[in-house]
Image (spheres, rainbow, N blue to C red):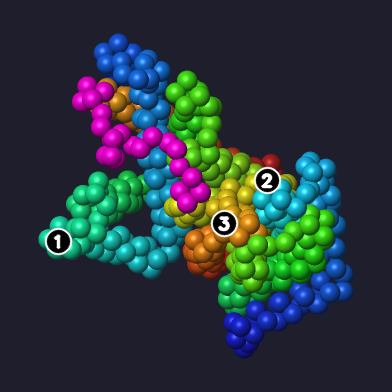
Amino acid sequence: MNRAFPILGILTAILLSYALYVALVVAPTEQTMGDVQRIFYYHVPSAWTAFLLFFINFIAAVQYLVRRNPSNDNVANWTLITVAVVTCIASLVIAVVPALKEAMPKDVQPSSIGTTGVIIAAAYFVIRKFFSVEAVDALAVTTAEVGVVFCTVVLVTGPLWARPVWGIWWTWDVRLTSTLVLWLIYVSYLILRRFSSSGQTPVMAAALAVFGALDVPLVYFSIWIFRTQHPQPVVGGGGSIDPRMLHVLLMNWLAFLCFAYLVCWSRYRLEIMKREVEEAQALESLLEPRSATR
Amino acid sequence: MPTPTGITRATLRKDLRLEWRSKDAVNSMLFFSLLVVVVFSFSFDPNAEESRRIAGGLIWVAFLFAAVVALNQTWAREIRNQVLDAYRVSPAPANSLFLAKAIGNFIFVSVLEALMTPLFIIFYQLRALGPTWQLLIVAALGTWALVVNGTFFATMSLRTRSREIMLPLLLFPISIPALLGMVQATTAILIGEGARVWIALLLSYDLVFTTACLVLFETVLNAE
C-alpha cells in the first residue's frame, strides 16, 4: 500500500473532526426542532453516500455481466453514449419548447435530465477505464458492503430523530420504507455472496444486483401510492434551508465521502489480496503432487 | 431439431406428468397453506368485517410461503442424474427451459390457489364488495410475479450452500412491491374500492422482471 493511503487517512480524520465541530457548534440551531435536528448532518450525508455506493455497485454489476462478451460490451458502450446524447437533446428540446416546459414538474430543471444522463455515462466509462473485469467484481463487493454500513447509519439515525420530532420511532412512509427495502436487498446480496460457491459467486451476485436496481423504482412507486410522511427533501426539493446549514451539510458530506472512499479503498485492496492468495493456493495445490514424486 | 416452443412444451409436459403422478409439490403446498390458514385464525377473531380488511394480506402471505415450497423443488429432479448439466451442453436455448419451469410453477401455484380460495372464503366468511372478476386478474398477475422471479432465484440458490433457505432470502426483498400490489389490490376489491393502479403496478412489475429473467437466465444457468 503506497504513501497516499496514510495521507488520505489523516486528511479524512481532520475533515471528519472539523465536520463534527461545524455540525455541533457552528451550525445554527433549528427553530422548531432544536438541537435534535443536528442529526440531519449525519443522516443525509450517510444516505447520499449509501445511494452513491449502491449506484456504483449497480454499474459494476452491469459491467461484470456485459464485459465478459465483447459484442455485449460494444452494445452497452453505444447504449450509454446514446443515453447521454438523447437526454442532452431532450433537455434542450424541453428548455426551448414552452409547452413541454409547462408539463414538467415545477422543481425539476430541464437541464437536470441531460446532466443525469451524462453523469451515468461518465461514471460507467470511468469505472470501465480503471477496473478490469475481475476488478469490477471486487469493486461490487466493496461498494455493497460499505453501502450497507452507511445505509444502516441512515436507518439508525432516522428513528433517533423521528422519536422526538414526530413522536414515533418509525413510520411506513415512502422514503423510509424504500430505504429499508434497499437495505434488505443489499443484505440479501451480501448473504448470497457469502453462501454461494466461489466460482459462480460474481455472476449470481451481479444478476441479483441488477434485479435489485430494477426493483428500486418499483418499490418507491408502489409505496408512494401507499402513503407518504417523510419531510420533503430540503436540498433540491420544495423545502428551503439556511445557507449556513447547507454549508455544514455539504462539509459533512465531503467528510463522509472521504471516509467512505478510504474504507472502500482498504476493503478493495483486501479483496484483491484475498483473491491473489486464493489463486496462489490453488496453483500450489495443483503443483504439489509433482513435487512429492520428485 | 425441435423449435424453442417445442422444447418448452416438452419440458412442461414432462414436469406436469411427473407432478401428476407424484403430486409432491401440490400436496405439500396444500397442507402447508392449510396450516397457515388455521394458525392465522388463532391470531385474530375472524368476523366478516375485520377479515375483509386483512384477508388480502393473509391469503397472499399463505400463498407466498406455499409457493416457496414448490419453487424450491423446481430443479430437484433436474439435479439428480445430472439432467441440468446435460441440458447445458445441449444446443437447446436456455430460455425455453426457463419458460417451461416458470409456466409449470405458475400452474402448480394456480392449482393451489384454486383449491385454497374456497377454504379461505368459508373460514373467514369473505364476500367481495367490488367486482370479483378483477380478483382473477390480480391472482394471475401476482402469481406470475412470484413464480417468474422465484424460478430465476431458485436457479441461483441451486449453487449455494443451504439452498432451501437461500431462495426466500433472495426472493422476498425483491418481491416486496409485487406483494404490496397483490395485497392492496385484493383488499381494495374485497372492500369495494378501485384497484386499477395496483393492477397496473403488478403488470409493470411482471413486464420488467420477465424481461430481466429472460435476458439474464442463460448467463446464470451457465455460470461456472
Place of residue B8 in the rendered image (x, y in percent of width and height, measured from the top left)? 65, 79
Residue B126 % position (x, y): 75, 59
Instruction: Give the residue pinned by disc 2.
Output: A289
Residue shown at 79% from the left, 41% from the top: B43
Q: Residue at x 21, y 49 (%)?
A: A109
Residue carrying label 3: B181
Give, as a single range, the part of the protein colored magenta.
A224-245
The amino acid type of the residue labelled 2 equals Pro
Which residue carries the number 1 mark? A98
Task: Report the front residue among B105 and A54.
Answer: B105
Q: Residues within 10 Å of mark 2 (few under 14, many from 20)?
A: few
Q: Position of residue B65 (x, y in %)?
A: 73, 53
Asked if residue A240 is among those painted magenta in the image, a careful observer would answer yes
Q: Nearer the viewer, residue A185 or A196?
A: A185
Q: Is residue B57 above or below residue B87?
A: above
Amino acid found under the numbered disc labelled 1? Pro
